[in-house]
């Protein structure tokens, strides 16, 4: 039986006012014409209302440059659905503009702070807008909007990212989300992403700076979206994070509790796997009952069985499998289980118990 869906993601557009080097959607070309028609967005919202889905997450591209974003928020609010805006926040640094989002019924903002300094922000995004992002954070706090600040961790910004979070906290942020940079590599040849983002090195670096992170954020809430295979961490560290309530794992793809729509109304399993379409609203289904039936067709069932499977038979006997699942599915487009072990600087084989 299909589990209930806790949220639906609507990819409103592919246009963006930044050019982040690690963006999973760079290959879309940030095409301005690639955006969800408003009638399609409303149709999907109606479907979510039929299914009792309580929350819609608006993503891009950069959804604040989507011309109908306020109409979408307003319509979802009228249908009794909460909306979260995932944004770089640059256009929310304007008080009147932010006020229009509040009046439309926006429930929450997840603001992605791209870097820890003006220089680093410009190098990553090709735009000089670090101060603008901090201004948006201050304005969100001032106007009482529920929001969190998210930061992507890479081999290049650990532990400097903490300085960015401290500045966000000074501006009024009290909730933070952390995640590791991920990369989908379907081609052949050397993967430059892994040269700078060896998962063992990432885990090691985060472990080293964790005490500093806790001290810097104090009583603010923060959580790491743990997308790495748990076997890359030193024994006991994930349990420490769990005790501190600073970690969560098993994404919506692995749990099967989310729905993601691209700009054309196609279902996709993951934001990063946006080329992997498995059904279209208005063609393969037009209401929630039809969507559930489509999700149970053999082709779709087999797709999710493959994506939700563990990467290696050894994982089946691992005591951590239930809270790991092998980490992000996208990891395994970069390396196999055996190749992962070769990246281990400690050189011992990954234990499975």
Image: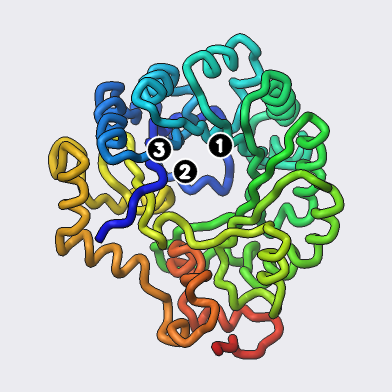
Q: Quadrant of residue 347?
A: bottom right
Q: Secondary structure at mark 1?
A: loop
Would you name the residue on which mark 3 appears?
54
Image quarter where the N terminus lies is bottom left
Residue 237 percent coordinates (x, y)? 71, 72
User: Residue at (73%, 70%) from the top-left corner?
Assistant: 204
Residue 324 percent coordinates (x, y)? 52, 70
Of labels 3 and 2, earlier in sequence is 2
Of labels 1 and 2, earlier in sequence is 1
Residue 19 vs residue 226, the one in the foreground: 226
Callout 3–callout 1 Cβ contact below 8 Å = no
Q: Secondary structure at mark 2?
A: helix
Q: Quadrant of residue 79?
A: top left
Would you name the residue on which mark 2 appears?
26
User: Residue at (66%, 74%) from the top-left corner?
Assistant: 233
Relative to 21, say whether 137 is above or below: above
Q: Secondary structure at mark 3?
A: loop
Would you name the residue on which mark 1 appears?
19
Relative to 180, say whether 350 is above or below: below
Residue 129 in view, yes or no = no
Relative to 237, say whether 28 is above or below: above
Distance, label 3 to label 2, CA atoms, is 30 Å
Q: Quadrant of residue 169?
A: top right
Distance, label 1 to label 2, CA atoms, is 8 Å
């Amino acid at each position: 039986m299909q589990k209930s869906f806790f949220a639906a993601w609507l990819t409103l557009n592919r246009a963006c006012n930044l050019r982040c080097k690690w963006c999973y959607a760079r290959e879309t070309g940030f095409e301005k014409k690639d955006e969800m028609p408003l009638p399609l967005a409303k149709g999907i919202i109606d479907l979510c209302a039929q299914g009792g889905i309580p929350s819609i997450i608006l993503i891009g591209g950069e959804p604040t440059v989507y011309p109908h974003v306020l109409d979408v928020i307003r319509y979802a609010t009228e249908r009794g659905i909460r909306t979260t805006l995932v944004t770089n926040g640059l256009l929310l640094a304007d008080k009147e503009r932010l006020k229009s989002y509040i009046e439309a019924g926006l429930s929450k903002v997840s603001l992605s702070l791209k870097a820890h300094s003006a220089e680093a922000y410009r190098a990553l995004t090709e735009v000089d807008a670090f101060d603008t992002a901090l201004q948006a954070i201050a304005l969100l706090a001032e106007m009482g909007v529920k929001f969190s600040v998210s930061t992507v961790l890479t081999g290049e910004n650990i532990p400097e990212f903490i300085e960015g979070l401290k500045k966000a906290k000074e501006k009024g942020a009290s909730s933070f989300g952390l995640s590791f940079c991920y990369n989908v590599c379907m081609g052949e040849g050397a993967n430059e992403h892994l040269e700078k983002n060896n998962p063992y090195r990432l885990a090691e670096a985060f472990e080293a700076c964790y005490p500093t992170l806790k001290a810097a954020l104090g009583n603010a809430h923060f959580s790491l979206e743990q997308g790495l295979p748990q076997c890359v961490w030193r024994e006991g560290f994930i349990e420490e994070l769990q005790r501190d309530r600073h970690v969560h794992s098993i994404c919506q793809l692995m749990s099967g509790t989310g729905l993601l729509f691209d700009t054309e109304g196609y279902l996709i399993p993951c934001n990063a796997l946006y080329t992997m379409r498995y059904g279209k609203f208005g063609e393969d289904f037009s209401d929630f009952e039809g969507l559930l039936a489509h999700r149970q067709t053999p082709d779709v069932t087999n797709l999710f069985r493959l994506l939700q499977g563990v990467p290696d038979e050894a994982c089946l006997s691992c005591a951590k499998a239930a809270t790991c699942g092998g980490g992000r599915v996208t990891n395994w487009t970069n390396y196999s289980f055996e190749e992962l072990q070769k990246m281990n600087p400690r050189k011992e084989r990954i234990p499975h118990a």
